[in-house]
Amino acid sequence: MIRPNLQGLLMALLLPVLATTGCNQSNSAPVSPKAESSPQSRQLKVVATFLPMYWFTKAVSGDLANVEVLVPPGTEVHEYQATPKDVQALAQADVLVKNGFGLEEFIENTVKNAQNTKLKEIEASNGIKPLQEISPVVKRAEKVDNDHNHKAGNPHVWLDPVLAIKQVENIRDGLMAADPANKGAYQANAIAYIQQLQEIDRQFKQSLQRYPNCTFVTFHDAYPYLAQRYQLKQVAVVEIPEDQLSPTDIQKTIAAVKQYKVKALFGEPGVDNKLLKSLSQDLNLTLRPLDSMEIGPLDPQHYFTAMKTNLQTLESACR
Ligand SMILES: [Zn+2]
């Protein structure tokens, strides 16, 4: 487990939210009149793997489906281990929504164990061209670390609003196919959310075009799609957030800062990494938090809140 203290704290904060916002709504949840009048009056049961997939699914489904999230919103998806509860949720679900590109390493076995032949799977990244290289600038060490290996390409597509639109469309199409009676409502909900994604893309474009090739160092290889979209340059020296930077990580950071005109170091929000802080001071660079949205609240609108904060962070770094 990474960052056990933070995780514990986050869970303590989030559990009441989980209990009250109905991430795990029972069948007593209000069923919309439309669903009641349809031939299959039972609410569609949807399971999303982790936070952004939950947001996009919930935004499209509204109250028409009962949407659950497997990876608790205070837990990292990268090293998540499935629980018996997850198997049970999948055994009872109609639809599974996953990001794909190898992010949800736990899901294949969990689906197998659930033995649900009726389960429909929606892979939100379907049709998206993956960026294969783990770190576009600094090459990864040769050592193969199976646990941390994004075999199918970098999975962090949701951080590019344009690719997020594609993910929402895939989810919309999957829900419409699974629950044709509510097609129109899924379509309308998707249009509203996509409009917001288009607006956030417009804001990113407008603002960041002033800083072409602005280069930043990250300690989580989460931003290659975002960087490509807005002509920025991510130098990821660490692939997945770690508790401690290794001496190699430090050397790679110093080398990257020497080699490129690095504008900022980006760490994880809410993590007080003292080593990273003192390293940034030594390098005379500001350490700022950039949010990969793998952890956060359940409200689908939080995507836009976090993206706006990320845009402000990028603006102040690249200026
Ligand atoms: Zn990640």
Image: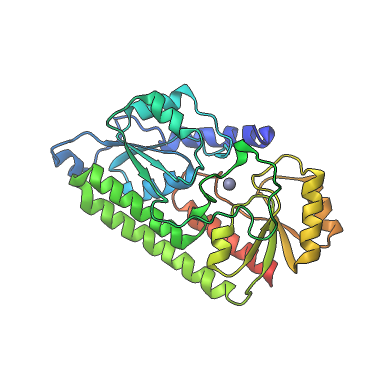
Does the image show residue 285?
Answer: no
In percent of width and height, residue 239 lies at 65, 47
Q: Does 3 sit left or right of 166 as displayed? A: right
Q: Residue at x 37, y 50 (%)?
A: 59
- Look at the image and tell me in which quarter the N terminus lies: top right
Which residue occupies the foreground of this view, 301 or 255?
Answer: 255
Q: How many marks?
A: 0
Q: Does 105 sit left or right of 269 as displayed? A: left
Q: Residue at x 40, y 30 (%)?
A: 111
Q: Residue at x 68, y 33 (%)?
A: 5
**Residue extending farthest top:** 84
Which residue occupies the foreground of this view, 135 or 243?
Answer: 135
**Residue extending farthest right:** 282
User: Picture quarter containing residue 116?
Assistant: top left
In percent of width and height, residue 164 lies at 44, 57
> What scheme was used to colour the molecule?
rainbow
Q: Does 219 sit left or right of 29 as displayed? A: right
Q: Residue at x 50, y 42 (%)?
A: 102
In percent of width and height, residue 143 lies at 70, 42
In percent of width and height, residue 90 lies at 37, 29
